[in-house]
Image (tube, rainbow, N blue to C red):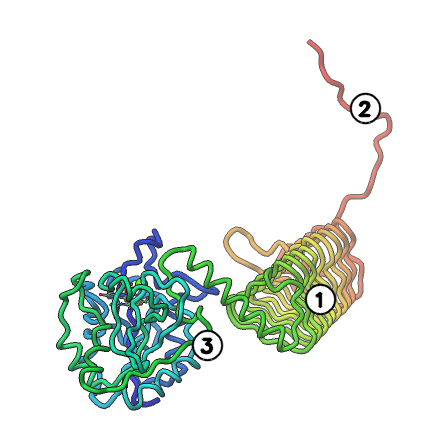
Amino acid sequence: MSDLSVVILAAGQGTRMRSRLPKVLHEVAGKPMLQHVIDAAEKLSASAIYVVYGHGGDTVRSSLASQPVQWVEQVEQLGTGHAVNQAMPGIPEHHTVMVLYGDVPLITDGTLKQLAVAATDGLGLLTTHLPEPGGYGRIVRDEEGNVLAIVEEKDASEQQRTIQEVNTGMLAVSAANLRRWLDALDNNNAQGEYYLTDIIASAVSEGISVRTVNPGAVAEVMGVNNRVQLAELERDYQRRQCEELMMSGVTLRDPERFDLRGNLAVGQDVIIDVNVIMEGDISLGDGVFIGPNCYLRDVTVAAGTRINSHSVLEQADIGADCRIGPFARVRPETRLADKVHIGNFVEIKKSRVATGSKINHLSYVGDSVIGSGVNVGAGVITCNYDGANKHRTVIGDNAFIGSDTQLVAPVQVGAGATIGAGSTITHDTPAGELTLSRTRQKTINGWHRPTKKTD
Ligand code: UD1
Ligand code: CA
């Protein structure tokens, strides 16, 4: 919608969050609430998005500095009408203005598109029905059902307070009309504020129709004032996301025990066991299995791979038919080719491992390039750090590194080489040969253990 300007109100203090962080920066599914609203607005292809900020404004602006929005400061919070008016100077007369809220994060573009349609020949107003409408502005209608006004709870009569249709705050209307009505607002009400909601009565008095739209789900219009409500929206969001994943063919062993804070792309027949957390951009190929209690951030996993329980993978590319974990830690900039095995208590960082290689037990592998068909024995350590710089370890195809070997980088192990168990390798080792560094085993006959002294 090229002639659409979106105004997102985000100036409120959010005292009830009891936080140093401005309310709109608190996260739902790993993303600031305000970012959710900006993303929904962007899906409408609005020509401009204005964010009205106030309390904690510098933090909000710097956290979301890369966003395609215009920042408008509301120095004093004099009410929702006053807040919207701060953005009006930049908005062309022929635009439709849509008002959204930085602390109402789950609004969907689908609902907002309907709201925009409702505004094409009048004022579009997003309302919902609540069994307990306390605290909300009530929608007052005449006998024919036409909207007459919004009455705030504090200004409402006893009778009006029984109305269960409430104002969500979101609306859309032409800029020309909105400007006129905002300029005419006064603050003669119970809270001494300039109420945006008073423009409804202005529209009605000018014979402009008010069309109401309802959200697809009530959670879309729920605001966050405290951390209890934040947690409720988080659950709601996760539940909806899980439903979409399951409908697309993913098995979630328990959708209540899976959290996705980012984007997940999946092939067919992916299985995710309980207590798994995924963040950032994740891609899982056909038949991938993620065991219980795993954490994945920015990871791609190719088809047929199993990530067994309690594994932590960050910024890594995992090939097809690999077996990772249980208890593996795969750190950033790691690329594993197909059929690689990374076993328990193995930490691997910034390394490449070629096809079919195995690092199965108790190892640290950092800054390494490992060929194909390599066996890295239990307890092998790459000593990649000299206290000042990091150095590389290179292991050729089909090498065999005996258990408890230290590879002191920079060092290269030739293709097909064998390293004897317990070696400390400080120089490059030739291909195809056995290299070891350890003293010959000896026995000292008649040696006795020390005995405890008595005094
Ligand atoms: C408002 C509506 C009410 C609606 C309710 C839904 C008005 C007068 N009332 O009431 O009908 O049912 O929302 O939640 O609009 N804000 C600013 N600057 C201000 C004042 C508010 O940016 O000067 C922002 C706040 O950060 C908040 C939003 O506007 O995100 C709503 O303000 P709030 O004071 O909470 O309005 P309510 O009393 O909840
Ligand atoms: Ca509110």
Q: CA distance from mark 1 to mark 2?
A: 51 Å
Q: Which residue is mark 2?
A: 448
Q: According to the image, label 1 marks what residue?
A: 306
Q: Position of residue 283 (x, y in %)?
A: 60, 74
Mark number displayed over residue 216: 3
Badge 3 density bin: few <14, some 14–19, many ≥20, Cα 10 Å = few
175 vs 138, nearest the viewer: 138
Mark 2 residue crowding within 10 angstroms, few (<14) / some (14–19) / many (20+):
few
Q: Which percent across, then down, holds residue 134?
A: 34, 61
Judge by depth and name the residue closer to the eye, 214 or 437: 214
Q: Secondary structure at mark 3?
A: loop
Q: Is residue 398 left or right of residue 30?
A: right
Instruction: Determine whether 96 is above or below 247 in the image.
Output: below
Task: Identify the mark nearer the N-term, 1 or 3.
Answer: 3
Name the image quarter holding the N terminus: bottom left
Label 1 element class: strand
